[in-house]
Image (cartoon, rainbow, N blue to C red):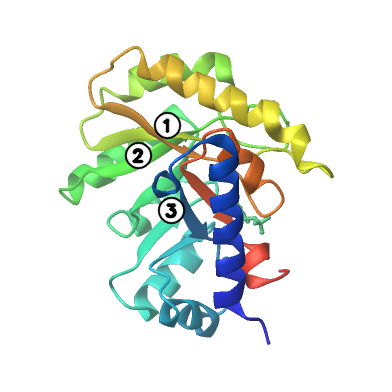
Amino acid sequence: MIMISENIETVKNKILLACEKSGRNPNEVTLIPVSKTKPVSILLEAYKSGVRLFGENRVQELCDKYSQLPADIDWHLIGHLQRNKVKYIIGKTKLIHSLDSGDLAITIDRESKKANLITDVLVEVNVAGEESKFGLSPDETLDFVKKTSKLSHLRIKGLMTIAPFVADPEENRPVFRRLRKLSVDIARENLDNVSMYILSMGMSNDFEVAVEEGATFVRVGTAIFGAR
Ligand SMILES: *Cc1c(COP(=O)(O)O)cnc(C)c1O
């Protein structure tokens, strides 16, 4: 039996240590337990131990779990979002971490307007330039943010990246550092309707390095819920 609450404590303690090491305030870092592929019973166990936010990477799965679990949960969509699925999740997410194209932004804006609400999003950046990954290149991100900030029913709250899968998490330090620098550069532009407070980076393998480099959200699945 997996001890979810113990695993969460372990991860939180590692976050605390990473904050101490880098002189950061632990209150600035939020752990998002990533529950994708795990059954509702497991999420409920986490809920009972106090978890009130979950990360999911598929629309269908998020909607299924949303309808079966208590209403006081914040749902984070962290995986690639197809335009034709947007209508199903508008109003259900606390934050969409994976805005990766202008067409998707327009769709999110339109569906949010129809629902009379504003959807918070992060811009996904493919810092390492991996072909297998979604996200904007660092060079095109500022222009994209400028254009997207003109949409009325969507709000950019920061940046997200999925770092490469590496054996040694230290290898991803430059990736996290680059995302943080990019967010600082964009924040300096003082764009209307844009904030850069959120940096969503770091997963089970590398979240400590990500915290040291400024992550405000870490997305951790395996280290909490076990292998998928
Ligand atoms: C699955 C997933 C995670 C969590 O990955 P682990 O290595 O299991 O911690 C984080 N972010 C995204 C976008 C994911 O799809």
Badge 3 amino acid: Lys
Give the residue displayed 26% in from the left and 28% down from the top. Answer: 151
Q: In this view, does 55 lie to the left or right of 74?
A: right
Quarter of the image with the C terminus is bottom right
Q: Is residue 60 above or below residue 179?
A: below
Q: Is mark 2 within 8 Å of ligand 1?
A: no
Give the residue displayed 50% in from the left and 33% down from the top. Answer: 100
Report the front residue among 168 and 153: 168
Q: In this view, does 67 lie above or below 83?
A: below
Q: Where is residue 41 in the image (x, y as percent from the top left)?
A: 52, 85
Ligand 1: quadrant of the figure: bottom right
Q: Is residue 17 above or below residue 156?
A: below
Q: Does the residue labelled 3 lie within 8 Å of ligand 1?
A: no
Q: Does the residue labelled 1 lie within 8 Å of ligand 1?
A: no
Give the residue displayed 37% in from the left and 78% down from the top. Answer: 69
Of the numbered discs 1 and 3, the one sitting upstream in the chain is 3
Q: Decide: marks 2, 1 in contact (CB < 8 A)?
A: yes
Which residue carries the number 1 mark?
103
Of the numbered discs 2 and 3, the one sitting upstream in the chain is 3
Callout 1 secondary element: helix
Which residue carries the number 2 mark?
107
Q: In this view, does 39 lie to the left or right of 53?
A: right
Report the front residue among 37 and 227: 227
Callout 2 secondary element: helix
* Distance between the alpha carbons at the discs numbered 2 and 3: 10 Å
Instruction: Confirm whether residue 195 shows in the render.
Output: yes
